[in-house]
Image: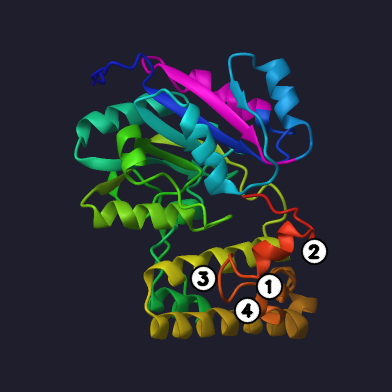
Amino acid sequence: MDQPRTSSPIDISVLVVAFNSRGFIDECLGSIEKAKERASVEVLLIDNGSDGTEKHVSDTFPQVTTIASEGNVGFALANNRLAQHAKGQYLLLLNPDAFLQYGALDALLDSAARHPDAGAWGGITLDGNGQPDFGNSIQMPSLRGFLSSMIGLFGAQDTHSSGITSDRRADVLSGGFFMIRRDLWEEMSGLDERFFLYCEEVDLCLRLHKSGYDLWQIAAAKAHHKIAHGNFQSPLRRLYQAAGTMEFLRKHWPMHRRIIAAGMMWKAAILRVSLGALLGWCSDRLAAAGRGYRHVALRPDLWLRGYHTRSGLKARLDRGALADRTKR
């Protein structure tokens, strides 16, 4: 189905926020060309890292518009900066470690025509075995979800094994492969910059739902994803996830529900650290989880109030008090 054109000659502006991505950015940017036949596309990149990705992209991909780095300003603010320079009818947020499959951008554009009342459309991210990864199972935070995490029930996240064969409505779309109408992005004021990393797309999805828009996940739009190209069980990564979640809860949940959820998150972290200490000798998985959750368990002062507090995680990162090696 051909996508109707607007006054803009560009259909999709692809926004890439890099962070020490030089080792795989060529594969990401190179995949964009084969992902389109009919879609007109521009690519914009900003580098939150310090490994020379920005210069490398400027030298190797002159067609990519690079926006001057402001340091590691976070995922939300960096995407908002890119969007200010974008000209497309649609904005596509794409992780630098996501490699688009053939026709993925055309498929998203076609889906926008099939579901014109939707606000955003997402693709399917695949792991190294070609199966849908955990990014396709992101759920809106709930007390039931926190309880499931605490006691280790993950049965609801069945997309890993079953695959996704048809378009479906979604509560949340992954921010690593996420297309939204430009006018709606502006109406929503983009991503909320109080989120440094994690849950910024969950917040945007909730705001879209509250404004009456559906979200669609498109089966024909696929990308391989080098999941957490750093260490997935990095203690800092888990700390970011906890802080991002609490920032979301502070914004959207009443106090009593936040307290219950925070207690469940803390208890889940303590249980993982304890199991890692007791049984890590016989299970690499438990040992890795124990190491990964140690900051969340032992330093709740860094995440219990989200990011923007005087003594919290973001403040300590701004002061250089914590090494920042986490990649989205």
Structure colour scheme: rainbow
In the rendering, which numbered label is found on residue 311? 1
Left or right of 200 in this view: 237: right
Nearer the camera: disc 4 or disc 1: 1
Please report whichever mark, 1 or 2, sits nearer to the chain's N-terminal start: 1
Nearer the camera: disc 1 or disc 3: 1
Please report whichever mark, 1 or 3, sits nearer to the chain's N-terminal start: 3
Residue on which the image places disc 3:
246
Q: Amino acid at mark 4?
A: Ala
Query: Is residue 59 visible to us here?
Result: yes
Q: Amino acid at mark 1?
A: Ser
Please report whichever mark, 3 or 2, sits nearer to the chain's N-terminal start: 3
Residue on which the image places disc 4:
269
Check if mark 4's residue and mark 1's residue have beta carbons within 8 Å: no
Check if mark 1's residue and mark 3's residue have beta carbons within 8 Å: no
Residue on which the image places disc 2:
321
Q: Quadrant of the N terminus?
A: top left
In the rendering, which numbered label is found on residue 41? none
Please tell me whether mark 3 sits on a helix, a strand or a loop. Answer: helix
Please tell me whether mark 2 sits on a helix, a strand or a loop. Answer: loop
Q: CA distance from mark 1 to mark 2?
A: 11 Å
Q: Is residue 313 above or below residue 325?
A: below
